[in-house]
Amino acid sequence: MKNLFLSIALALVTSLATAQITTPQTSSASQEAAISQGNWMIGAGLGSTNYNFDTETFNISVEPRAAYFITDNIAVGAQVKLGLTAYDGGSTFEYGVAPLVRYYFPEGATPTSRWFAEGTVGIGGSHMKDNDSDEPVSLLIGISGGYAHFVSRTVALEAALGYTYNKSDVGADSGMSGLGLTLGFNIYLPGQSR
């Protein structure tokens, strides 16, 4: 009995000593398949911080998006903008919806990352608490460039820097325009043909 116990213990120790130790996966070499024609991209910019040149205030916004890859590297879809600007003496709620086009550059690509450019043109507005100068509908134009790092076969973390122009009347001195940094994620879903 003693020999049986020692044999089992020796076998267990030997198997643990020779077992392969694997590190957690921090990236995936699958970005080519994720950005292929027929796939869907669903995600959001979770932390857009924006500097406003007109009022010198900061805001934070969430920008959910969905797009369809019409061809490899090119996605077309829509984005919703929801934001809140706080400043001394009040706050402003911003909203908007815009079609988007995103292009992933093949140049500079690695097995786990891609650079991209994105453009949006749509409508937006704002509501300022206790103020009659709201912008119910305005022109919303945005352009940005960013970096997507694929942490799995279907998920990418992103950072983008861009410029947003939002003004209801060209002749009026109102609107929210400025530079912004967005941190977010996208989930890539295969199309029905895959």
Image (cartoon, rainbow, N blue to C red):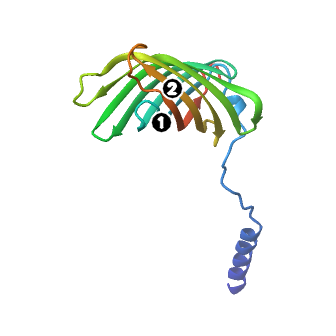
According to the picture, the residue beneath numbered tag 1 turns out to be 50
Q: Earlier in the sequence, mark 2 or mark 1?
A: 1
Residue 192, image x, y percentages: 59, 20
- Vertical side of 110 occupied by 141: above or below: above
Q: Quadrant of residue 166?
A: top left
Tell me, yes or no, whether the two marked residues, 2 and 1, touch with CB atoms within 8 Å: yes
* Frontmost residue, 129 versus 61: 129
The residue lying at 42 percent from left, 36 percent from top is 56
Graded by Cα atoms within 10 Å as few (under 14), some (14 to 19) or many (20 or more), the crowding at tag 2 reads many
* Frontmost residue, 32 versus 98: 98
* Frontmost residue, 42 versus 135: 135
Q: Quadrant of residue 54?
A: top left
Amino acid bearing label 1: Asn
Drawn side of residue 139 relative to residue 144, left or right: left
Drawn side of residue 143 relative to residue 51, left or right: right
Residue 104, image x, y percentages: 68, 26
Amino acid bearing label 2: Thr
Residue reaching furthest to the left: 130
Drawn side of residue 100 relative to residue 124, left or right: right
* Frontmost residue, 30 versus 12: 30
- Vertical side of 194 occupied by 84: above or below: below
Residue 15, image x, y percentages: 74, 68
Q: Quadrant of residue 150?
A: top right
The image's mark for residue 107 is: none
- Vertical side of 108 occupied by 133: above or below: above
According to the picture, the residue beneath numbered tag 2 turns out to be 164
C-alpha span from label 2 to label 1: 9 Å
Drawn side of residue 11 relative to residue 50, left or right: right
